[in-house]
Image (cartoon, coloured by chain):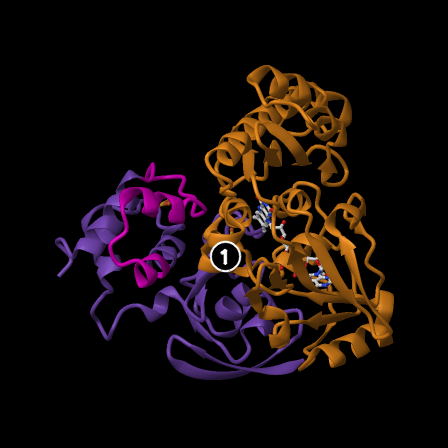
Amino acid sequence: MRTLQLRVNGEPVAREIPDNRLLVDFLRYDLGLTGTKEGCSVGVCGACTVLLDGQPVSSCIALAVMADGCEVTTIEGLAEDDRLHPLQRAFIEYGGFQCGICTPGQIMAAKALLDVNPHPSKEEIQGWMMGNLCRCTGYYKIIESIQAAAEGKGVS
Amino acid sequence: MISFSYLEPADIDEALAALARYGEEAKVLAGGTGLVNLLKQRLVQPTYLIGLRRLAGLKKLSYDGTLRIGALCTQRTLETSALVQDHVPLLAETCRQVATVRIRTMATLGGALAHADPNQDPPPALIVLDARVRVRSPQQEREVSVDAFFTGYYETILAPDELITEVIIPPLPAGSGTAFVKFLPQTHDDYATVAVATRITLDGDRIAEARVALGAAAATPLRATAVEDALRSQVPTPTVLREAAALVADAVDPTADFRGSVAYKRDMAVVFVQRALAQATARAQAGGGTA
Ligand SMILES: Cc1cc2nc3c(=O)[nH]c(=O)nc-3n(C[C@H](O)[C@H](O)[C@H](O)COP(=O)(O)OP(=O)(O)OC[C@H]3O[C@@H](n4cnc5c(N)ncnc54)[C@H](O)[C@@H]3O)c2cc1C
Ligand code: FES
Ligand code: FES
């Protein structure tokens, strides 16, 4: 056991955890942040994507101890008060999801992209988002949603 | 998940002391993209996990004709660093083709060597660059060529108390061109069905030196010396490249899996060695640029 100290969605958090806790389990079970989903559990599907110091990572293959002292951002951290993040509004407006299980991961990956490249080309979006799998949408509307958010279209 | 005690040394001496104390009972953790899946599947069951992330000295990247890459540099750093893109473009080109941004953000170059999964992409590129690995134990420091680093399936020359500290890439001879070609018939984020790294170094219109190495083609990254020997002193015409590439069929020893049968992978190895040779040759002819 050890005490993990970090910031989650801007708030300081200190929590006692076993050394072998996975980051995804820490977020979901210890902190109750169930917005982050687990799909494949081996780093392939992207459902569990969160930002670790601003960088996208698979929380299913990261240990919670790897986030000690860091800033973790999850889907719960994007809205400000009741106002959704532009990416969240764009995914609603442009039909970027159906069942929604992949959506928190899609949006966190897209946020990491727009943070380093605010106006990506379609090809850049495709290259970056390649590892976030979706069984429902066929991807076109996910790409459209991200483009719309980047252009500030219909998401104000 | 198995249980273990996690230690986080503050510097390399502490890390080496912990390794010396616990030996076979310990495993070091870099990006975790290889190791955590093995822990979850109980394929590796260490009592102690030694996290390397506070070892700032292993995150350095510098160039003075020779490129020195700290073992903890991530594959995303190597893909995006201007230093690497300008001076060793083959390495940036290779890292760009590893899995997804999410994996490259975590996976380190030291991990790409120590993990020793023969399906990984960076090892063949490092072999054709004549790269060397710097390895440290509490008693000694040694340097090994990447070519001699892998000894078997997920096995290397590393002793239980040794750490990879640095990867060293010497300057390429003038007249060199390089290429990395990864065959991905299924999805772009997959491991290779076969991957080929090559270097062609020209002296005038003849090949002075060739390097060819493959990933996903045997139990270890595979250097195809028969192909290299056939190319030496030749003028690199399409026929010469094709005939040399054909020799790789006898060198590979691939495993049948969902990415293809043994026969298919052998055929594809020939095709992709030929393509990589053509690309490296064109780049060498285009003026000694390395990409
Ligand atoms: C979904 C997925 C897809 C992937 N696809 C690809 C791909 O297409 N191509 C590719 O090349 N790779 C791919 N990888 C990554 C690759 O297989 C390894 O996971 C990665 O290179 C390991 O680096 P790491 O820093 O995460 O190492 P870790 O997982 O931390 O460690 C791996 C091993 O190396 C040892 N180790 C790490 N650093 C050192 C050191 N400095 N000294 C001594 N020992 C050390 C550890 O003890 C462990 O045994 C993929 C990974 C995942 C999860
Ligand atoms: S659940 Fe983590 S990548 Fe699929
Ligand atoms: S919306 Fe259902 S998997 Fe993507």
* Residue A124 counted in the magenta span: yes
Say which of B197 and A19 sits in front.
Answer: B197
Task: From the image, state the color of chain A.
Answer: purple
Q: Residue at x 60, y 76 (%)?
A: B56
Q: Position of residue A116 (x, y in %)?
A: 34, 61
Quadrant in which residue B30 is drawn: bottom right
Q: Is mark 1 within 8 Å of ligand 1?
A: no
Residue B36 makes an appearance in the image: no
| Magenta span | A112-139
Q: Nearer the viewer, residue A60 or B25?
A: B25
Q: Ligand 1: which quarter?
A: bottom right
* Dot 1: element: helix
Q: Is residue B5 above or below residue A49?
A: below
Compared across the picture, whether B131 is left or right of B82 comes to: right
**Chain identity for the colour orange used in the image:** B
**Residue B221, above or below B256:** below
Residue drawn at point x = 64 percent, y = 25 percent: B269
- The one nearer the camera, B285 or B129, is B285
Q: Residue shown at 28%/51% (left/top)?
A: A120
Residue A147 sits above or below residue B238 on the image: below
Pointer 1 chain = B
Residue at the spot 50% in from the left edge and 48% down from the top edge: B89
Q: Position of residue B223 (x, y in %)?
A: 73, 36
Crowdedness near tag 1: few (<14), some (14–19) or many (≥20) residues, C-alpha within 10 Å: many
Residue B170 image position (x, y, % from top left): 64, 54
Residue B59 appears at what percent x and percent y? 59, 69
Q: Nearer the viewer, residue B27 or A20?
A: B27
Give the farthest residue toward the front.
Answer: B204
Which residue matches tag 1?
Answer: B76
